[in-house]
Structure formats: structure tokens, C-alpha cells
Image (cartoon, rainbow, N blue to C red):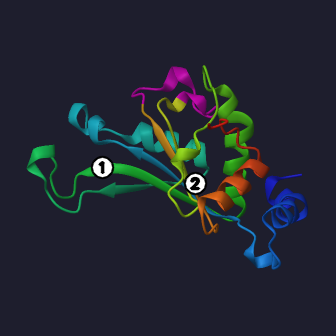
Amino acid sequence: MSLYERMKTEIAPAIKQELGLKNNMAVPRIDKVTVNVGIGTLMKNTKDFSNVVDNVSLITGQKPVVTKAKKAISNFKLREGLATGIVTTLRGRRAYDMVDRLVNVVIPRIRDFRGLSTKSFDGKGNYSVGFRDCLVFPEINPDSLVNPHGVSVTIVTTAKNNEEGIALLRKIGFPFKKEL
């Protein structure tokens, strides 16, 4: 059973009862998942970032968008129109599949993992986690990796505050640290 179906049958009723909500539509859900890679340092060394685009498309299963600088900033050696990042937005079933893979495949592959911090919530129930190395994703072949890069994943929820977001992600299976 996929996470999308488990959310409807098991997780949403449990969250509704835990938070004391009366309406089914008030239960927090995953709205979208964005996968970002910054390529600013890559652009200083080489101008070819097609392998990073290929890696992100392997991770997410859809073609990413290359973001470009809107204006020039001389202190950062940034010119207008220069590629600065790669982003993919996943919604619906694909978002739930990505979160499922994060919890069950990617996070267990992190070396010396001691739990995710609950301080990465933004105050509105959205959670961001960054990976320094893209090799934690099993889709990427280490032999074909030309430029090592990090990956940032943001999970946007319909939660109203951090407590609802934490409750949602705990029920999904995120391994949060026991904060004192």
C-alpha cells in the first residue's frame, strides 16, 4: 500500500484524533515537495551542469527547471541570466511517493544519522531538509557522478503551525530527534 493510500485510510484519522480536529478537511496533508540544487559554485568551475540536471531528474522522476539570476550582483560575480539553481516541484501522488522514498530509503542511507531536527520547520508547518551529498539517493550511480552536489528537499504541508506539521511527519515516519 502506497503512502498516498495509507494517508487516507490510516494516517489522516490518527492525526485527526491526536489533534482533536472535527473536520476531515482540517487534517494537515502534504501539499507539494520541492527538490532544489544550487549550482552557483559549479558555474565558477565549469559551464556544463547537464549531469546535475540528469541527477535531479533521476531523483524526482520528472524534468527539472533551471532557474536563472534576475539581476546582476557584482559582489557574488553573478550576471543577469546566469543559471543559479535547479528546481523540481512534485504534487499529488508523486509528492507522497517522494516523501515515502525519503523516509524508507534515503534517510536510512545517511552515514552517522542521529535523527532529523525539528528546528527546520518554518513556523507554518513546512519542513526543509538538506543533504550534503546526492549519493544518499540510490538512483544516482556513484561511478557516473562528475560533480558532487547537495540536494535540498522542502515538504510543504497544509498545517497551520509547526505542531501540526510535526504530528503529520511523525505519523508518516520521519525519524525526528528527541529534543530537550
Distance from the alpha carbon under mark 1 to that under mark 2: 19 Å
Q: Is residue 12 magenta?
A: no
Determine which of the numbered discs, if any, sits on residue 63 in the image.
none
Q: Is residue 140 magenta?
A: yes
Residue at the spot of label 1: 84
Q: Nearer the viewer, residue 85 or 24?
A: 24
Q: Quadrant of residue 160?
A: bottom right
Q: Quadrant of residue 38?
A: top left
Query: Is the magenta region chiefly helix, strand or loop?
Result: loop
Residue at the spot of label 2: 62
Write the residue at 51% across / 44% down: 56
Give the number of marks: 2
For this view, does 65 lie left or right of residue 173? left
Please state which amino acid type lies under the numbered disc 1: Thr
Write the residue at 50% across / 57% down: 122
Q: Nearer the viewer, residue 111 or 88?
A: 111
User: What SS does tag 1 mark?
Assistant: strand
Span highlighted in magenta in the image: 135-148
Write the residue at 67% across / 49% down: 98
Please state which amino acid type lies under the numbered disc 2: Gln
Neighbour class for label 1 at 10 Å: few (<14), some, many (≥20)? some
